[in-house]
Amino acid sequence: MARQAKIVCENVWKVFGANPERTLRDLDRSLSRAEVLEQTGHVIAVKDVSFKVQEGETFVVMGLSGSGKSTLVRCISRLIDPTDGSVIISGEDITKLSHNKLTDLRRHKMSMVFQHFGLFPHRKVIDNVAYGLEIRGEARASRHEKAMQVIELVGLGGWDSHYPRELSGGMQQRVGLARAMAVDPEIMLFDEPFSALDPLIRREMQDELLRIQAQVQKTMVFITHDFLEAIKMGDHIAIMKDGAISQIGTPEELVANPADDYVRKFTEDVPRYKVLSAGKVMRKPENQLSNGTTVKTARTAIAKMDGKTAFITNSKGIFEGAVRASDLKRTTAATAKVSSCVDAQILAVSASTKLEDLINAAAHHDAPLAVVDDNNKLVGEIDRAIIMEAMTSS
Ligand SMILES: Nc1ncnc2c1ncn2[C@@H]1O[C@H](COP(=O)(O)OP(=O)(O)O)[C@@H](O)[C@H]1O
Ligand SMILES: [Mg+2]
């Protein structure tokens, strides 16, 4: 059975103006957003948007300014009500929730990180971070204990008694992040959290969030207008234009097959190594030997391989290392098992690793890289040349 998605948006619309429902009911859907505005005075901020976000994934919504991203994410948190459509969280349609249940949802299930941090200037870092726990009615000692943990997690250890104004922009956003995490929400919503930061700090915060996400595995919806940020952060990306979604896909899918010119324009300048993963460029392992093979047999086999590297696997296909002709020469006993000569230093990389993260490995490695799946099973190999080639093409 397919896993139930954590967040499902079904045909969500948001119309701003004096009479949104009627405007939507009578809407001529062939009209552009600008034409609707001109004829009715209403803004179609979100137009028939549908998507699913699986538990634990980071779903990015990317689009130019005014494309409806903030409005969409506010519909998900129900800071505003969609004019039409459903937002289903863990199987429950939240557009139908009572006021009390909605408050409960916001306090316990989701939290939000904004571009302009939104910190309380007169509260110390720790009391900013503990805010969500405070309004839930948690006792001071317990909320401070939890706050201190997330302050450490976001790299702000030692800053708990400072005031926001004493912190740099990047550090203030770490407080924003800590505050959102303190309530241990199931869902985290980010509305351009790093857009106000300098490029270097921004990159640092992206890496930080990726590191934290690998640890906590929350369901995240991350808004950005920056395509490079989108492909770095997102498991899936929805590209928005004029309130509607142009395309949804993995970073690789978008770059490989942009659905229209709008999407293509974003992908044009993206270097291939930033989106391609090891699994996409690997080939079947050419030379594979079982760990039970004798050194004698392995010598013959490797001689036929033109002196190349052979990957050694056990009977279940689990990667154990690699053997080169030179490794075998050193061993005298021809009846010994090849597993005794394995060079365990040979790098095995995960199929999901981006080529960008393999450049260093490839530069310091004179053999093909082994590619393994989550169970460490050998699934492919990559020549260094492929990685170097991807670096120089775009
Ligand atoms: N409260 C509002 N009233 C009227 N129009 C709005 C309101 N909020 C947003 N809009 C309009 O909706 C469109 C989408 O805005 P927004 O969701 O903020 O886009 P983004 O976050 O992608 O920049 C814009 O044209 C904006 O002017
Ligand atoms: Mg916005």
Image: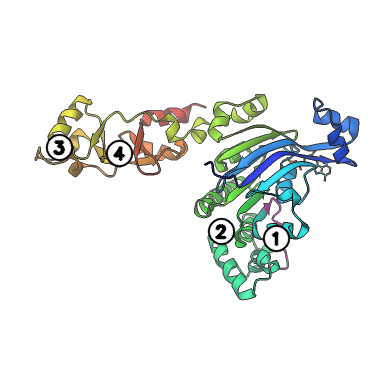
Kindly report the distance in space between the C-alpha atoms of the residues bearing marks 4 and 1.
49 Å
Q: Report helix, strand or loop for mark 4.
A: loop
Numbered tag placed on residue 146 in the rendering: none
Circle 1 crowding by C-alpha within 10 Å: few under 14, some 14–19, many from 20: few
Seen in the picture, residue 158 relative to 215 is either above or below; the reply is: below
The percent position of residue 231, horizontal first and vertical second, equals: 57, 38
Q: Report helix, strand or loop for mark 3.
A: loop
Foreground tag (1 vs 2): 1
Query: Which residue is tagged 1?
Result: 104
Query: Which residue is tagged 2?
Result: 154
Identify which amino acid the numbered label 4 is placed on.
Gly
Kindly report the distance in space between the C-alpha atoms of the residues bearing marks 2 and 4.
39 Å
Quadrant in the rendering for residue 29: top right
Query: Which residue is tagged 3?
Result: 294
Foreground tag (1 vs 3): 1
Seen in the picture, residue 320 relative to 135 is either above or below; the reply is: above
Identify which amino acid the numbered label 2 is placed on.
Val
Kindly report the distance in space between the C-alpha atoms of the residues bearing marks 1 and 2.
26 Å
Query: Which residue is tagged 4?
Result: 317
Q: Report helix, strand or loop for mark 1.
A: helix
Q: Residue at x 21, y 28 (%)?
A: 307
Identify which amino acid the numbered label 3 is placed on.
Thr
* Magenta residue span: 113-124
Q: Residue at x 71, y 37 (%)?
A: 49
